[in-house]
Amino acid sequence: MELPILIFFISLIFFLFLIKPYFYTKKLPPGPTGFPIIGSLLQLGSRPNQSLAKLANIHGPLMTLKLGSITTVIASSPETAKEILQKHDKIFSARTVPNAVASQPNWEATLAWVPPDNMWRNKRRICNKQMFTNQKLDSLQELRRQKAEQLVSHIRSQCESGSAVDIGRVAFATTLNLISNTIFSIDMVDTEFKTAHEFKELVWTIMEESGVPNTSDYFPLLKWLDLQGIRRRIRPAYLRLHEIFEENIEKRLDDRATGQTMKKDGDFLDVLLDQCEVENSGFDRKTIKPLILDLFIAGSDTSASTTEWAMAELLRNPEELNKVRQEIIQQIGIERAVKESDMDKLPYLQAVVKETMRLHPAVPLLLPHKAQHDIQVLGFNVPKDGQVFVNVWSMGRDPKYWEKPLEFMPERFMESSVDYKGRDFEFIPFGAGRRICPGMPLAIRMVNLMLASIIQPFNWKLPKGMTTENLDMEEQFGVTLRKAIPLVAVPNFENK
């Protein structure tokens, strides 16, 4: 059912909401007036990141939208983002949980969506200590090197057969195997990457449906009707992933019961199962699966998407692609594969990744924050339970902070101290504050390695008949931002 039809249906039963005043009496940030009952829902469109950026140009960098019965504040500048994510970080550290997310089993056990209570802090501490510290990441360098080599080997076979390569698909398969090895010590995708399709479809179903403007979120009294069918479509994907995880957990428990362990030091599943045995830890077989799901989704989809966008920008800008490849060949050569320890020698490659994340942040609107009580921000009031979005996509394209903001110019990062670690608010692709993405260190390592690994041995070209001018760069909005049309490119072995 189309959204306008749903809105019309909702307007017919507007009397359900007469018990709430439409206008909030306090001084909210400015914003569009909107329509009675539905507010500004129709103005979101299919790409809310772009629609909200245009509205912010009219109404200002701190803007209020009435979305159904929900007061929503949009921060679209470094100054407003800093207020939300740093100055008032504690007050805005809770989440608004979309109905689509709440349709998964035990969503209260997730890492991304629960309030920042003691249980959340414990989970985050375990993830940071057991997966994302420099020491732990260094210990898994060999694993990432092997996965990168498998990726190159697959592309080489495609090259020999003259076939084009779906960059997003092979990048997703690579990151999926990395995450599955880190957690379960197994590959979930075969060496030819044929079995990646099901997992990718499951993950993107979750990411896309969770990002769709949902009437169930904006009219909570009607959420039981699931008018857009989002809950019905997304829940089977959640259940299937939980089923896959349960199979691996069951097998591991059998191995542990018989004294068979897969790794001397244990993987992350062993860490979680050990926690399940600790009294009052809050971990059990049901609650570890949502945490595993968070790690799989965040780790595989975002890194793959960033790699695909980077290759798309480089293919659209052949001079930059040649410059990256020449840097790799001059610093490392072509006789051996790129390693993570080589990255300090490849500043232009790192600049390419940063520029890609500026133009195409994996999460264009940071996951929604929620005010835990009434709060003043830059002279305006944000009411208790008001949800707040930070438009990272808009901030990365703001001409006030970026020269020629719509152009792909990696050079802008070569002499710049601006980084993605949450301190420079004009560039926060991973967020900032206490809810900054914990997987940032792994994501950066993996994207840098994948991109260098597939550029080093091959000269990449667009398919026959496609030019840099007609390469489609349209976005498809979800929780993450992927290319609307997957990038397909042709590798060859020329080393010039």
Image (cartoon, rainbow, N blue to C red):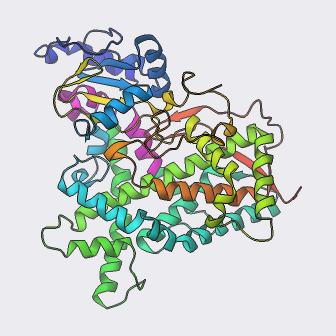
Asked if residue 327 shows in the view, the reply is: yes
Q: Residue at x 33, y 21 (%)?
A: 6
- In depth, the one of 269 and 254 nearer the eye is 269
Expressed as whole percent of the image width and height from the top left, the position of residue 22 reads 19, 12
Q: Residue at x 32, y 8 (%)?
A: 33
Is 323 situated above or below 59? Answer: below
In this rendering, the answer to whether 370 lies above or below 55 is below
Residue located 80% across and 35% down the image: 467
Residue 214 in the magenta stretch? The answer is: yes
Residue found at the far bottom of this picture: 259
Where, by quadrant of the figure, is residue 38 drawn?
top left
Instruction: State the quadrant of the C terminus.
Output: bottom right
Pinpoint residue 39: horizontal percent, then vertical percent. Answer: 30, 14
Residue, far left: 19
The number of callouts visible is 0
Which secondary structure type mostly characterizes the magenta part of the structure?
helix
Q: Which residues are magenta?
A: 203-228
Relative side of 418 to 320, left or right: left
For the point 50% across and 49% down, which residue is it? 302
Between residue 113 and residue 391, name the one nearer to us. Answer: 391
Residue 210 placed where, x, y %? 37, 40
Q: Is residue 56 magenta?
A: no
Counting from the top left corner in percent of width and height, residue 356 is at 61, 41
Quadrant showing the N terminus: top left
Taking the image as drawn, is residue 213 in sight? Answer: no
**Closer to the camera in the image, 353 or 236:** 353
Q: Nearer the viewer, residue 377 or 174?
A: 377
* Residue 271 vertical position relative to residue 409 in the rendered view, above or below: below
